[in-house]
Amino acid sequence: MTLPWGGLSCCLSAAALYLLGRSSGRDAEALKSVTRVNQLKELAQLLDLESKCLPLIVTISGRVGSETPINCQYSGLRGVIVEETAEQHYLKHNDAGSWIQDSALMLSMSKEVPWYLDDGTGRAHVVGARGATGFVLTVASEVFDESGRSLVRGTLDYLQGLKMLGVKRIERVLPTGTSLTVVGEAVKDDIGTIRIQRPHKGPFYVTPKTIDQLIANLGKWSRWYKYASMGLTVFGVFLITKHAIHYILERRRRRELQRRVLAAAAKRPGQDNESSDGKIENGSDCAKRDVLMPDLCVICLEQEYNSVFVPCGHMCCCTTCASHLSNCPLCRRRIEQVVKTFRH
């Protein structure tokens, strides 16, 4: 019996989506339970009162600021996190004789300076933002410089199967003044500087969405994952049930064919070898079965079988019935060729 891989795949995918839905739901519940700080000046007082025994997980909002911002080379913006990448684009001669476009990374550089959130009442420094959930840098500049190589260099590249197109430079930045919401553990050092960092256990988000938008979005994805999980489960169970029913009916059909063949063999004249007192002369059930088994076609049960199926090799049908079949009735393997056989 072959396994119903389609149904099993649907059930496994449904289980994965269900786990994702539960994870999103837990994150939404965790965000509902964090302490909301409306003004950053209140955060210092909360840390003095509530962070003595347990870590304080808070959500704060403000605008990005820094004492030493980075001046972006291409966009002219001032930011606190800047990532620059350069990709070489070229045409490559493949084995089929045509040119296909490809690219290779030439440069990847990242810069970050200490930065904070400021809402006008206070400041909170943010640490490790690039590892937070929901953190995305804005594409500030995207420039494509066409290749200006010399004739000699261009000829050498062409002989190697390359045509240089140019260099694409992308600059991503977190600009100063950007409004952000941060969810994380709030701590205060000995000199009174407040930091928001990744907690040992709990949510860590840096996102332009508000906390209410974040909770609503997680709840929506949680429901979508659960609905998709239910749909895939129903479909997977349907495929498995269909495969099981088909297998049971096929087994029943084979048993019925075998029974009909044995019944037809018992009615054939001269087939049974009887002794003088009218009894069958054999010593075991296996021998009796071999004697009663005729050489009849399993489809029509009238003609003797004389056709071999290629590639499975089964011989169980006459040429008339075999001409109407696409799969072997014994192993269900696809028939590629039917070869007629002769006994004499």
Image (cartoon, grey):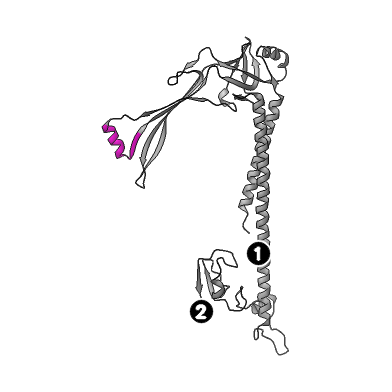
For mark 1, give the secondary structure. helix
Residue visible at 67% across and 41% down in the picture: 227
How far from the left and from the top, in percent, is residue 149? Answer: 30, 30
Give the image location of residue 124, x and y in percent.
61, 15
Q: Say which mark, if any, is on residue 342.
A: 2
Q: Picture quarter containing residue 225? A: top right
Q: Quadrant of the N terminus?
A: bottom right
Please provide percent x and percent y for residue 10. Answer: 63, 47
Q: Is residue 261 left or right of residue 141?
A: right
**Real-space Cα distance between discs 1 and 2?**
30 Å
Report the residue at 65% width, 27% height from top: 213
- Which residue is at a point 63% across and 54% down the rendered structure image? 4
Name the amino acid type tagged 2.
Phe
Instruction: Judge whether residue 158 is colored magenta.
Output: yes
Instruction: Name the residue tied to disc 1.
Output: 250
- Residue at screen point 65% across, 57% down: 243
Q: Main SS type for the magenta part? A: helix
Say if the magenta span includes residue 18.
Answer: no
Q: Please give the range of residues in magenta.
A: 151-164
Q: Farthest residue to the left: give it.
A: 152
Dot 2: element = loop
Circles 1 and 2: CB atoms closer than 8 Å: no
Task: Check disc 1 and give the amino acid type.
Answer: Glu
12 on left or right of 320: right
Q: Is residue 336 above or below residue 152?
A: below
